[in-house]
Image (cartoon, helix red, strand yellow):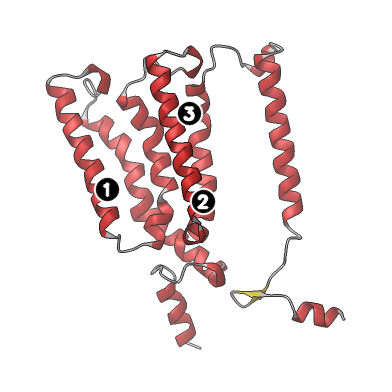
Amino acid sequence: MAGAHVAGRPRVGGRLERGTTRTGPWVVAACVVAAALLLVVVGGYSLHWRWTGLSGSVTLWDWLQVLVLPVAVAATPILVRHRRGLHGRHRRAMAVGALAFVGLVFAGYLVPMGWTGFTGNRLWDWLELLLLPVAVATASAWATSWPLARSHVVIVAGVMAAVAVLAVLGYTIPWRWTGFSGNTAWDWIKLLLLPLMVPLVLVPPLATYLSDQFGGSTPPGRRYGRAHAGAGHGGR
């Protein structure tokens, strides 16, 4: 019976599927961390525990500076493996979340809402906050759709052209809301270096590694890892 049970397990990449036996500890750890974070937040904002360092002066902007990049990094391996498996409802949910965040940003500036901490931050500050996390979060598109589709090329080219136009106008007019005036070429290098390295240098090895480890669940259309896997089978 035990042998039949083992024989009946699905195989992934030539290895036996371990099922959900390793999920439990991760779920427990995530729940513990979430509970501890909730306790700190409630204790800091509501109970005024000084040791937490949280008070009304710690705004949503401060939380975004802490959380945006780690969340993007944690989501990247999942998106690289399962991006093509996302259904329409998943994409709609992400689109709704993005639109809700954009609406919150506009409200934070126009109302204004002090707890957001958005007032006073300019376009340069938003680029520093979001450019690298966005590059990391969209790494799955670079890893699973190479060469890039025409629509992706158009989007990337449009964003780059818009930033270039805003940079020229921000320096020459100058537009204070851009926050570009006063930033040197060195500041631009620090802003753009890592976001450019993510898709060009870091993503291809990550995609190949995931293809080697989880070959049975990787998207068939991805070039990275397929050539490597094909060479491995040919050498047998």
Residue receiving disc 3: 65
For the residues labelled 1 and 2, the Cα–Cα distance comes to 25 Å
- Callout 1 environment at 10 Å: few (<14), some (14 to 19), or many (20+)? few
Residue 41 sits in quarter: top right
- Amino acid residing under circle 1: Val
Q: In which quarter of the image is the N terminus?
A: bottom right
Question: What is the x, y in percent for residue 27?
Answer: 72, 47
Residue receiving disc 1: 156
> Horizontally, is 37 left or right of 89 in the view?
right
Q: In this view, does 46 lie above or below 197?
A: above
Instruction: State if disc 2 and disc 1 touch (CB < 8 Å).
Output: no
- Amino acid residing under circle 3: Gln
Q: What element carries label 2?
A: helix
Which residue does the image show at 39% across and 56% down from the upper left?
141
Residue receiving disc 2: 89
Q: Is mark 3 on a helix, strand or loop?
A: helix
Sequence-wise, which precedes: disc 1 or disc 2? 2
Q: Nearer the viewer, mark 1 or mark 3?
A: 1
Q: Is residue 226 above or below residue 125?
A: below
- Amino acid residing under circle 2: Arg
Sequence-wise, which precedes: disc 1 or disc 3? 3
Residue 99 sits in quarter: top left
For the residues labelled 1 and 3, the Cα–Cα distance comes to 24 Å
Q: Nearer the viewer, mark 1 or mark 2?
A: 2
Question: What is the x, y in percent for residue 198?
Answer: 38, 49
Q: Nearer the viewer, mark 3 or mark 2?
A: 2
For the residues labelled 3 and 2, the Cα–Cα distance comes to 29 Å
Residue 17 sits in quarter: bottom right
Question: What is the x, y in percent for residue 149?
Answer: 29, 60
Sequence-wise, which precedes: disc 3 or disc 2? 3
